[in-house]
Amino acid sequence: MVGTQHAARILVASNRGPVSYTLREDGTLSSRRGGGGLVSGLSAIGPDADAVWVCAALSDGDREAVREGVGEDGSRMIAVDPLTFEAAYNGIANSVLWFVHHMLYQTPVEPVFDEDFRGQWASFEAYNAAFADALAQEAAEGAAVLVQDYHLSLVPAMLRERRPDLRIGHFSHTPWAPPDYFRLLPDDVAEELLAGILGADRAAFLTRRWADAFAACCVSVLGATLSADGLEVSWRGRTTRLGVHGLGADGDFLRERAHRPDVADWMETLRAETGPGRKLIVRVDRTELSKNIVRGLLAYRQLLDDHPDWRGRVVHIAFAYPSRQDLALYREYTAEVSRVAEAINTDYGTLDWTPVLLRVDDDFARSLAAYRLADVALVNPIRDGMNLVAKEVPVVSDNGVALVLSREAGAYEEMGRHAITVNPYDIRATAAALHTGLTLPDADRADRTKRLADAATALPPSRWFLDQLHALGD
Ligand code: G6P
């Protein structure tokens, strides 16, 4: 299918694709398959469907793979020039759009919309146009195109201009900012982003809250009108239907994967590292500003102050995997996470008890081992589109888990009732929630875990993906 023109009936477009390539020292390429909801969702349509996944070349290895024509069947990598990519990805997508939707700016001094920003915005337009070109080239007459996430907000309108015959969907995996915050963006940029997504027939979100915020932005910024149910946005003679699809955990895959020998080995290692019989508070995240890892650690510290009887009897396992380390703020945040964890260990640790076990290298099997062992799972983001960790832990938990969950995570809509919910900014309340989680009676914990697991697997990735295709009329 690679390179075939006008052949694909189903197309997916996302910045990060299913495979990444690394250039070895001897000049050869090694490849690595990624995981995530989109990869398992796409597998639901089977290998025979005429499907193509269009993604960006993210690294030198990816760009070399494109040059050599190396690639997986059914995927097409786009190699825009590295400076354009850098400005679009790090400059706009991760430093502006991510910050707006997660409301991360320190607004007295940020954001700054200067000449650099304007250059980056032009790169973002060029990068989105490169996707629109590739999709227009690959799509068969009337094909369904599923465009993913904030990196590609402009693609739907650009693609419609090139190929009015296509059925186009856009899916946002992030929250959407409310109008007062979204309007931080320069007016023309705010308008172009909304108009870009409204180029789609359907614009879908992980929760109703994010869909409503998008609709409110369309009304406030563009003067669009809404249908009575709030789920149809009309603007300039076209109507875009909004959808809500709360991506869930892949229960079958997780349960099978969590019972392989490498996970059992990791469970033994973690038990040895944390000490037998101790309660475990577990968190697993990208080291991401919006995940609120530092406040999570401070809440744990507060727990040890408020309830000294927990000292020596509990360990906080914090897996914080590297993410977006090209950005200075992320490097600083990573360092801060380590500093705070080390300070807790220095101030409270004893000869035979290390209060925090921080690990910063990514290992999925080790994460699953921690999920299985967890007594309490801490998921306290400032703001999060969904948060799959909250959904994965109860599915694989061995002995039941109490979920401490931020009310600002998308997962809260489906799981909040069975979790111990927190205001993510309130460290003292988070400490109290950790204590409640640790002391939850066994029967209550077992009951909640079952309800959490049911809610978490209600819309597995395969159904999530097919639902979107069906909504486009496939
Ligand atoms: C979020 C976004 C995804 C992104 C992922 C990892 O979940 O919604 O689009 O792929 O973070 O971020 P990265 O910048 O490493 O792709």
Image (spheres, rainbow, N blue to C red):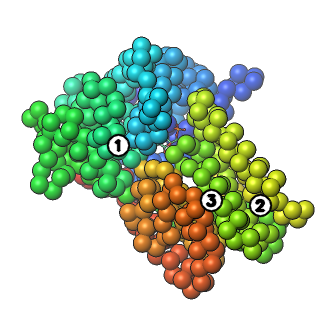
**Dot 1 or dot 3, earlier in sequence:** 1
**Could you tell me the amino acid type at mark 1?**
Ala
173 in relation to 44, above or below: above
- Front tag of 1 and 3: 3
Whether tag 1 and tag 3 are in contact, CB under 8 A, the answer is no
**Could you tell me the amino acid type at mark 2?**
Pro
Position in image of residue 386 (x %, y %): 44, 54
Tell me how far mark 2 sits from mark 3, CA to CA. 13 Å
Whether tag 2 and tag 1 are in contact, CB under 8 A, the answer is no
- Front tag of 2 and 3: 3
Q: Nearer the viewer, residue 371 or 344?
A: 344
Q: Quick check: 405 left or right of 22?
A: left
Position in image of residue 264 (x %, y %): 73, 65
Residue at label 1?
177
The reply to whether residue 83 is in sight is: yes
Tell me how far mark 1 sits from mark 3, CA to CA. 27 Å
Residue at label 2?
355
**Res 435 → quadrant:** bottom right
Q: Secondary structure at mark 3?
A: helix
* Residue neighbourhood size for the residue with mark 1, other residues' Cα within 10 Å, grouped as few (<14), some (14–19), many (≥20): many
376 in relation to 344, above or below: below
Q: Which mark is residue 299?
A: 3
Q: Nearer the viewer, residue 400 or 435?
A: 435
**Could you tell me the amino acid type at mark 3?**
Ala
Name which residue lies at 22% across and 34% down.
221
